Image (spheres, grey):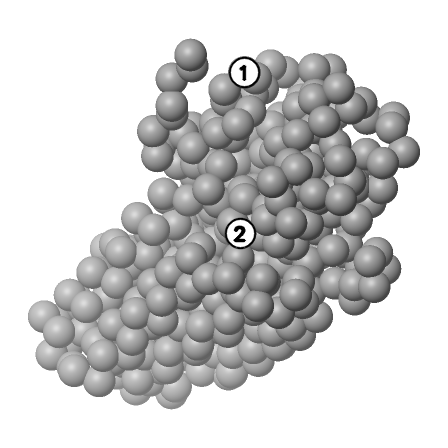
Amino acid sequence: MGRRPGLIDDFAPTGSHTVLPQCNLFFSQIWNADQQSLTTLFPDSSDFFTNYNVTGESVREDPVVEVARSDAGVGVGSDCQIARVGHRGSPGDIALIVLSTLSFILAISLSIHASKRKAAVGRIELRFFLFMYGLHSALQIITMSSLLQQGSTALSILSSIHVAVIVSMFWVLLGNAIIATQVVEDGTAAAIAPLSILAILFFIPTIYISLDTSLGWTNVFEISGDDITYLKNIALFILSLLWPAIAVVNYTVLMLYITLNTLRETKPAMLYLGAFVLFAIAQVIFFLVSQPLCDSSNGKVNSAFLSTLLEAGAVGLIYLAWKSITEDDWGEEAYGAYY
C-alpha cells in the first residue's frame, strides 16, 4: 500500500474542489501520459462525470472519453464543474469572466491614478504590482473560466504562465513593503533592479516547473502510482500555494510596522489590516465554498468570482493605504521623510 502524502505534497483537495490554474497542469499530464489514469480525471463518483461511465479499462480514444474531456471544466475529478463553454449548454463561468474583467479595469485605473502622483513614494513599485495583478486578472479569464479544452497544449501553456505570474506577483507585493522601509531609495535603480530581477527569478523556475508538469518534458515532475491520486508536486505546492501566503503575511507585518511604529498612523494601518482580512476571507471562500456553491447553482457558478471580488477589494484597500501615507506633490513624502 502506498504512503498517504502529507499536506505539503498533496494537490488532490485543491484539484477536486477548486478551479486553480494548477488543476489544468495536472489534468494535462494525466491525460497525455502513456499510462493513463482516466478514472482520476473522470471518476464515476463525480456527479458531473458519472454518466460517461469511464472505467479503468477505458482509453483516450474511446468516444465517451473524448466527450467527457470536451465537456470538462476546470478541476481534476470534481464532483461539480462548470462545463466548458458551448458544451452541455454552458456559457462558461460568466460570473468569473465579469469579475476578472472588472479587476483588470481596476488595475489599469489604479495604475493611471498612481502615475499622476509624481512625487509619491513607492509609485513605480506599486504600479509594478498593479501591472502584475492586472495580468493575473486577464489570464484568469482564460485559465479558470472553462473556455479552453482540458488537456490542450494552449491551456497548458497559458496556465503555466498564469501560475508563474501569480508567484512573481506576490514577490512584487512583498518587495513593495521591503522598499517601503527605505532600506533602499524607492524609484531608483537600487530598488527597481532587485525587484525586477527577483520577479524574473521567481517567474522562470515556476513556469519551467509548470510546463514540465503539464507537458511532461522530463520525468522529474511526473506523477504515477499513488501520486496520481494525490496529485503530488512539492515544488509547485510550495511556490504556488505556500509562498503567496508567506508573502502576504510578511507584507502585512512590514506595512503595519511602518504605519504604526514609524509613522504612528492608525488609518493606513487599518486599511492594510483590512486588505489582509479580505484576502484571507477570499482564500477561505475559494477553497471551502466552491463545491457547495457549484452544487446549489447546478453548475452555473463557483466560489472563484466571490474570491476575485474580495481580492479586488484587498487591492483597492492597499492602494488607499498607500495613498494615505504619501504625498502627490513635491512636498515632504510621508514615509520617505524619516530615513
Q: Amino acid at mark 1?
A: Gly
Considering only order in the chain, which callout, 1 or 2, is on the residue closer to the N terminus?
2
Pick the quarter of the image with the C terminus: bottom left
| 175 with respect to 73 (left or right) | left
Label 1 crowd bin: few (<14), some (14–19), many (20+), radius 10 Å: few
| 160 with respect to 318 (left or right) | right
Q: Relative to the observer, which residue lies in front, 153 or 54?
A: 54
Pick the quarter of the image with the N terminus: top left
Residue 135 visible here: no
Query: x%, y% of residue 163?
Result: 56, 45
Q: Residue at x 85, y 36 (%)?
A: 64
Q: Relative to the observer, which residue lies in front, 277 or 196?
A: 277
Asked if residue 280 is positioned above or below residue 224 in the image, the reply reads below
Measure how far apart labels 2 and 1 are at the Cα level.
23 Å
Query: x%, y% of residue 43?
Result: 64, 36
Q: Residue at x 53, y 57 (%)?
A: 291
- Residue labelled with disc 2: 18
| 212 with respect to 148 (left or right) | left
Label 2 crowd bin: few (<14), some (14–19), many (20+), radius 10 Å: many
- Residue labelled with disc 1: 225
Q: Residue at x 32, y 57 (%)?
A: 248
Asked if residue 221 is positioned above or below residue 107 in the image, the reply reads above
Asked if residue 70 is positioned above or below residue 237 in the image, the reply reads below
Query: x%, y% of residue 146?
Result: 72, 55
Say which element carries label 2.
loop
Residue 43 visible here: yes
Say which element carries label 1.
loop
Q: Amino acid at mark 2?
A: Thr
Q: Residue at x 29, y 75 (%)?
A: 274
